[in-house]
């Protein structure tokens, strides 16, 4: 079965989302892919967190773009860890054989310089695929390296996915809902087993989930029943 199961923000079903603890568990326990989000601090350091603000997932408040790395590091996740830098996350993933989905979180904040800094840090990680809701960010990445695996995140129905991908030199679509086309698509965020089964039967390239172990078990049952 070709559908790869991605740990969405690591393994938030069991660990603080986008935490080093969660990523390390994914690596050691069979996640076929790992997804995370990257922002840029005031002093230009890429950090891994989902929201533009630290309010929801830490014990502090504020916008990442207005905080220095030292201020960001003073924020603690639910498990007591500080917000990780991209460098720290990549250190855990250095020997990881699965796919790494790095999302540029530029749909609400522009973060000038983020693309260049991320690509510099990620240059020794050929297993990284990139995604963003911001099409211009993906174009910037491809301008630096036309061979990158870039994928468009969407929360709306795309009328002609194959044309969009071809015109923008993108490798795939990362939609919230399944699209009826033959190209690469990885669907987010799928935690319902019945829906996941239907999508895997359709042969989608990947699923992002908050509980990768549950989805791995489903995938194995489907293989056994095939």
Image (spheres, rainbow, N blue to C red):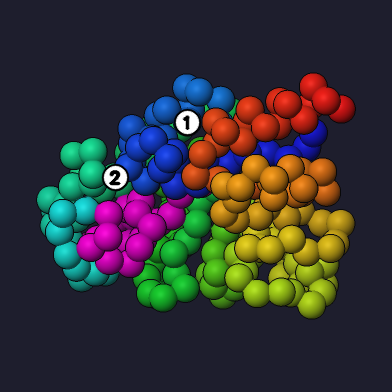
- Secondary structure at numbered mark 2: loop
Residue located 79% across and 22% down the image: 224
* Residue 117 at x, y percent in the picture: 40, 56
| Label 1 Cα crowd, 10 Å radius (few <14 / some 14-19 / many 20+) | many
Q: Splitting the image into 4 quarters, where does residue 194 fall?
A: top right
Which of the pair 96/81 is nearer the observer? 81
Which of the pair 178/81 is nearer the observer? 178
Reply yes or no: does residue 35 show up in magenta: yes
Magenta-colored span: 34-57
Q: Which residue is mark 2?
A: 84
When the figure is inspected, residue 72 is found, relative to residue 179, above or below; the finding is above
| Label 2 Cα crowd, 10 Å radius (few <14 / some 14-19 / many 20+) | many
State how many labels appear: 2
- Screen quadrant of the C terminus: top right
Residue located 58% across and 41% down the image: 6
Reply yes or no: does residue 27 show up in magenta: no
Q: Earlier in the sequence, mark 1 or mark 2?
A: 1
Between the C-alphas of marks 1 and 2, the distance is: 16 Å
Which numbered tag is attached to residue 26?
A: 1
- Secondary structure at numbered mark 1: helix
When the figure is inspected, residue 2 is found, relative to residue 29, above or below; the finding is below
* Residue 8 at x, y percent in the picture: 50, 46
- Screen quadrant of the N terminus: top right
Residue located 47% across and 31% down the image: 26
Q: Is residue 215 in view?
A: yes
């Amino acid at each position: 079965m070709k559908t790869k199961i991605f740990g969405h923000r690591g393994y938030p079903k069991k660990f603080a989302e986008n935490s080093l603890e969660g990523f390390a568990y994914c690596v050691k326990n069979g996640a076929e892919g790992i997804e995370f989000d990257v922002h840029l601090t005031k002093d230009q350091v890429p950090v891994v967190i989902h929201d533009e603000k630290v309010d929801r997932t830490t014990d502090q408040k504020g916008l990442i773009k207005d905080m220095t790395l030292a201020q960001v590091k003073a924020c603690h996740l639910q498990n007591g860890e500080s917000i990780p830098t991209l460098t720290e996350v990549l250190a855990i993933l250095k020997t990881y054989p699965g796919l790494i989905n790095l999302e540029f979180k530029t749909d609400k904040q522009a973060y000038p310089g983020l693309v260049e800094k991320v690509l510099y840090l990620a240059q020794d990680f050929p297993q990284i695929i990139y995604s963003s809701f911001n099409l211009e960010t993906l174009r910037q990445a491809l301008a630096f390296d036309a061979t990158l695996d870039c994928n468009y995140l969407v929360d709306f129905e795309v009328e002609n996915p194959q044309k969009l991908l071809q015109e923008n030199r993108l490798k795939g679509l990362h939609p919230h809902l399944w699209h009826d086309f033959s190209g690469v698509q990885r669907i987010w965020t799928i935690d319902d087993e019945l829906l996941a089964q239907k999508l895997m039967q359709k042969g989608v390239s990947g699923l992002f989930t908050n509980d990768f172990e549950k989805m791995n078990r489903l995938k194995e049952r489907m293989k056994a029943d095939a």
